[in-house]
């Protein structure tokens, strides 16, 4: 069996080549590679490689967006073949852009990277009022919440959301992660959240938090 | 003890521009809509009323005494004039909710902005004239507009626009020609009323696009604007780009802009050594961690540090914030930045 096909698939995602991704996913299915393997060793690996290039400042936002499109094109081919919840059994994370802000490129990148890394992401969208975060956590029993904003003016809204989330009586300790243009480590420290500088960092951060808390 | 100023902001900046001696380093924080806090009005009311714009700008200048008063359509105004739909939250800055075009076939229908036919752009010029009537003897009043790349991103929708840099480069150039022509029309209208115009192009940052895309899609259009400005007005505009700009400093200077304003993540000493002999440098106290959340003491220290790093830049230095201030930046912190220029920016 041509396992190398997954290497070529990863490279096609990294190289922003949606057409090649679709063809390679078809080929991989045909030779009997499971959808989970295709996601994990092909699509997700390609996004990880793109992430490395981003960290090395060889890739920038346009390239990451196009890699994401290529990966999505591959996922679309796989969707009918996915057994329920396959590859998505992971921890649940609630994500959203706080109220007053509609800039969601950063949030979408974080969401995608988390999904590719196997997390179940509940996306509340943009301009999300604080009670909607509380509601989503209550419903899904998510242990992780990601808050994003691009604007310094709406950053204070993060404190409001955190306050309301902490007022909620939960049987476990909720972990809150924040990110976005004006947000800094110092600000996150001050409001009692964890900070990720970018989408790659968000995945690393949640893995770290999971290890730390043992779930 | 804060030494008193010996020149008015107007005298200081006139002398600064001519390279003559000045009493202290100029200080011009990017106050933006923070001026609404001085007269206690919501941002959307301010943006829709010439009277409120005039009052807020005049009162904020009287309160702080900074070295330049600026008002203009900024990043969103041009995109709106080209057909993007904005949302005006009651008390916050506007945001683009629907781009002007959803595909490039619609581009043919778009013509460069004509200022006198556009109500909002005309409103800024009216307000600028009235502000100048009231305080123009004390301070230079000027305008500012979003740069061509950021305007283009808002006309097309940011996600698609960024992908188009690779998918559809020819259309990106078409769009850049349209926004550039629109900016020139606005600058021309402003200049005819005696106002110079600065540019801010945050989307062109190396935090967003690669330096090679900057050279391909941004630099030629900035150069076109600068060339026009020098020919028409005798001087070049200033340029602010947020985020990381290290890889494009030389390119920014090569566009011929007169002054470059940088984000707080930029090291002022490094940019001074790189291009400080070619342009005025402006920056760069952290608008959030220091200006919004810091104490006046921390602001003064940060201001002092900027002056220490770049106060001796050969092309000149203006103390400022690294980006536009948050609306609710404490007044005492803006005052503290002014004080830093007075305390640590005396010319020996």
Image: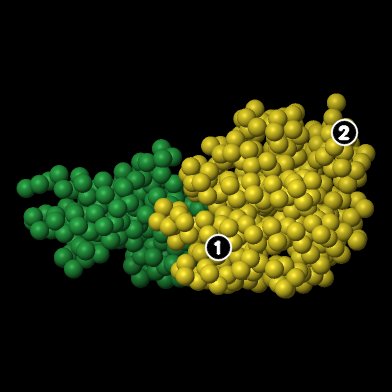
Q: Colour of chain A?
A: green
Q: Colour of chain B?
A: yellow
Q: Nearer the viewer, residue B155 or B227?
A: B227
Give the side of residue B310 with respect to residue B156, left or right: right
**Residue A127, placed above or below residue B306:** below
Which residue is rendered at x = 72% and y = 67% of the image? B115
Q: Nearer the viewer, residue A49 or B125?
A: B125
Give the side of residue B346 with respect to residue A166, left or right: right
Q: Alpha carbon of mark 1 to alpha carbon of mark 2: how far?
A: 41 Å
**Mark 1 and mark 2 on one chain:** yes
Question: Residue A82, position in %: x, y?
Answer: 18, 64
Which residue is rendered at x = 72% and y = 41% of the image? B258
Which residue is rendered at x = 26% and y = 46% of the image? A11
Among the 4 quarters of the image, the one containing residue B126: bottom right
Which residue is rendered at x = 28% and y = 61% of the image? A73
Residue position for label 1: B154
How many neighbours does mark 1 have within 10 angstroms: few (below 14), some (14-19), or many (20 or more)?
Answer: many
User: Under tag 1, what secondary structure?
Assistant: helix
Residue position for label 2: B20
Question: Residue B61, position in %: x, y?
Answer: 84, 54
User: Under tag 2, what secondary structure?
Assistant: loop
How many neighbours does mark 2 have within 10 angstroms: few (below 14), some (14-19), or many (20 or more)?
Answer: few
**Residue A80, placed above or below residue A106:** below
Residue B200 visible, this angle = yes
Number of numbered callouts drawn: 2
């Amino acid at each position: 069996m041509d396992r190398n096909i997954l290497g070529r698939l990863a490279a096609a995602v990294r190289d922003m080549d949606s057409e090649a991704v679709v063809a390679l996913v078809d080929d991989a299915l045909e030779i009997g590679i499971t959808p989970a393997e295709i996601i994990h060793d092909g699509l997700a690996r390609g996004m990880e490689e793109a992430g490395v290039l981003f960290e090395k400042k060889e890739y920038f936002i346009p390239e990451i967006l196009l890699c994401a499109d290529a990966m999505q094109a591959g996922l679309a081919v796989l969707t009918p073949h996915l057994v329920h919840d396959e590859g998505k059994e992971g921890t649940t994370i609630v994500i959203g852009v706080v109220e007053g802000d509609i800039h969601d490129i950063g949030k979408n990148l974080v969401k995608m990277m988390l999904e590719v890394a196997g997390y179940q992401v509940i996306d509340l969208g943009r301009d999300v009022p604080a009670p909607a975060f509380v509601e989503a956590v209550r419903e899904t029993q998510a242990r992780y919440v990601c808050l994003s904003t691009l604007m310094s003016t709406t950053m204070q809204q993060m404190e409001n959301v955190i306050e309301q989330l902490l007022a909620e009586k939960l049987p476990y300790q909720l972990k809150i992660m924040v990110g976005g243009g004006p947000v800094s480590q110092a600000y996150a420290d001050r409001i009692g959240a964890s900070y990720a500088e970018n989408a790659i960092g968000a995945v690393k951060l949640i893995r770290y938090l999971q290890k730390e808390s043992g779930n | 003890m804060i030494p008193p100023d010996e020149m008015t902001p107007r005298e200081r900046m006139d002398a600064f521009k001519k390279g003559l001696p000045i009493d202290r380093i100029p200080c011009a924080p990017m106050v933006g809509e923070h001026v609404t806090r001085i007269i206690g009005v919501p941002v959307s009311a301010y943006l829709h009323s010439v009277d409120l714009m005039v009052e807020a700008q005049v009162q904020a200048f009287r309160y702080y005494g900074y070295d330049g008063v600026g008002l203009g359509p900024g990043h969103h105004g041009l995109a709106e004039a080209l057909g993007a739909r904005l949302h005006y939250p009651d008390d916050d800055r506007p945001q683009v909710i629907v781009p002007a075009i959803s595909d490039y076939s619609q581009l043919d229908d778009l013509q460069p902005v004509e200022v006198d036919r556009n109500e909002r752009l005309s409103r800024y010029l009216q307000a600028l004239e009235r502000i100048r009537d009231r305080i123009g003897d004390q301070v230079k009043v000027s305008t500012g507009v979003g740069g061509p790349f950021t305007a283009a991103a808002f006309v097309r929708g940011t996600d698609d626009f960024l992908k188009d840099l690779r998918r559809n480069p020819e259309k990106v150039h078409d769009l850049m020609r349209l926004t550039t022509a629109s900016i020139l029309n606005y600058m021309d209208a402003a200049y005819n009323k005696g106002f110079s115009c600065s540019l801010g192009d945050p989307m062109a940052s190396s935090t967003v696009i690669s330096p090679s895309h900057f050279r391909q899609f941004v630099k030629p259009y900035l150069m076109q604007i600068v060339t026009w400005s020098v020919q028409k007005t005798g001087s070049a505009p200033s340029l602010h780009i947020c985020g990381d700009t290290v890889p494009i400093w030389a390119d920014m200077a090569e566009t011929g802009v007169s002054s470059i304003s940088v984000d707080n993540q930029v090291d002022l000493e490094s940019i001074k050594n790189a291009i400080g002999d070619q342009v005025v440098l402006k920056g760069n106290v952290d608008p959030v961690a220091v200006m919004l959340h810091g104490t006046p003491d921390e602001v003064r220290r940060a201001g002092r540090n900027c002056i220490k790093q770049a106060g001796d830049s050969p092309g000149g230095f203006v103390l400022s914030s690294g980006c536009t201030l948050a609306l609710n930046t404490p007044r005492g912190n803006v005052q503290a930045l002014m004080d830093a220029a007075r305390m640590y920016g005396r010319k020996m």
